[in-house]
Image (cartoon, helix red, strand yellow):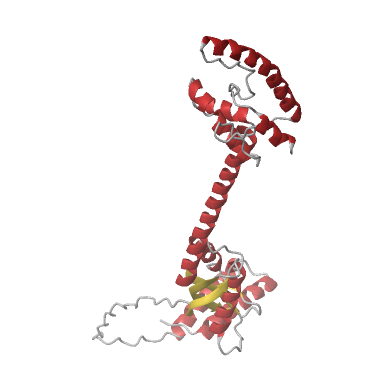
Amino acid sequence: MKLHRNSLLTAAAIVLVLYVVSLIVGLPTWAPVVMAIVLLVLLAVVWKQPEVPKAAVQVAQAVPAPVVLPDPVFTGPPTRTVVDVRLPSASADFQFSFSAIVQWSTVLSGSRHADLGAVAVDALLKRARALAVGLQVTEEALNQQHLAAILGEPALDDKGQVRCWATEVRLRLPEADHKHLQHLAALHRLEQTTLIERRMEQDKRAYLKDDVFATPGSAAVWWLANHPGDVENAVGLLGTLGELSAAANDLPARRESTETVEQVKPTRAELEFTAAVDDLRAPNAAALERPAKANGTTPRAVEGPPSRNGAKPADEPRDEYREQFYSE
C-alpha cells in the first residue's frame, strides 16, 4: 500500500482539527484519539492501491570490471642548459667557465613574457656573476661547491615573474689559464727561494767581514775555534789570516817576507857615523899592518859594528857609498 503525500497531509490536518474541537467542546481526552484512529483507518481503506506485479524474470546484473588507473606522471619544471659562460673572478687576469642546468617555475599567472626561460637564465647568471667575482682562482673545487649550494636555492628574478634555481653546477678555469696559473705559482716559489738564499748569503758575508775578519786577531781566534789545539798551523797562517782581514776591510795587504821587504836607505846621520867609525879604524889597521909585514903574515881586518840588517861590514872602502848618498 502506497499513500500519497497529499493524503497524509490531509489526514494530519483532520486529526489536528478534531483535537482542537474536542478541547473547545470539552470532550474527554481519549475521544479525539479514538476519532483520529477511526479516521486514519477509513483513509487507508479508501486510498488503498493494488501493487503492480513484478516481472518474474529478473535481469542479471553485470559485474563491473575492475578499473585500472594509470600510474601518475609527474612533470618536472621547465629547464634550460647554459654551457661555458665566462664569469669574472677576484683576479683581473683570470675568468671562470660556468655551466649549469637552469630550472624555473612561473610565479605570475597572467605573465605576458614571450620567453620565461630567458628571464630565468638571465636572473641566475646575474646571481652567479655576483658570487664569482669574489672567488679566488686557486680554490677551484671549493668555489664550485660554494656556487652549487647557493644557486640551488630558488630565488625570484628582478620583476618577480619566475622563480629560478640551478642544478649540475660546474665552475672551472680554462686549460690555458690553469697552465698559466701553475707557471706563476712555480715562479713565485722560485722567487721566494732565491730571496731566502740571498738573505742567508748576506748574513754569512756580514758575519765574516764584521766579526771573523774584523781584525787579524779575530781571524786567528776564528781559525783556532774551528781547529782546536792546532796552534802551530795557526802561527804559520798568521800572515794569510792578516791578508784576508785586510782584504775583507778594503785595506792594503802587507807582506813581511825577506823577498819583498825593501832595504831602508840610511839617513845622513847614519852615514856620518859610519864614516867616523871608518876613520877611527884606519890608523889601527895601519899599525897592525906594519908588524904583520915584518913577521911575514897577512893582517886581519878589524871588525866594525854590524849593520842594521845584521850583516857584518865589508872590508872594502865605503867612499863611493858615502859619496852616493851625500850627492842626493
Q: Is residue 136 above or below residue 290?
A: below
Residue at position x 39%, y 77% from top? 73
Image x and y of residue 131, in percent: 60, 67
Q: Decide if residue 268 is on the left or right side of residue 288.
A: right
Taking the view exactly as shown, the residue that stands out farthest to the right is 269
* Residue found at x 42% / y 76%: 74
| Image quadrant where residue 6 sits | bottom right
Q: Quadrant of the C terminus?
A: top right
Q: Position of residue 234 (x, y in %)?
A: 52, 25
**Which sits in the foreground, 54 or 76?**
76
Q: Nearer the viewer, residue 276 or 80?
A: 276
Can I make out residue 238 in this image?
Answer: yes
For residue 88, side relative to residue 44 (left or right): right
| Residue closer to the observer: 162 or 172 | 172
Q: Quadrant of residue 31?
A: bottom right
Q: Position of residue 264 (x, y in %)?
A: 66, 32
Quadrant where the image shows the N terminus = bottom left
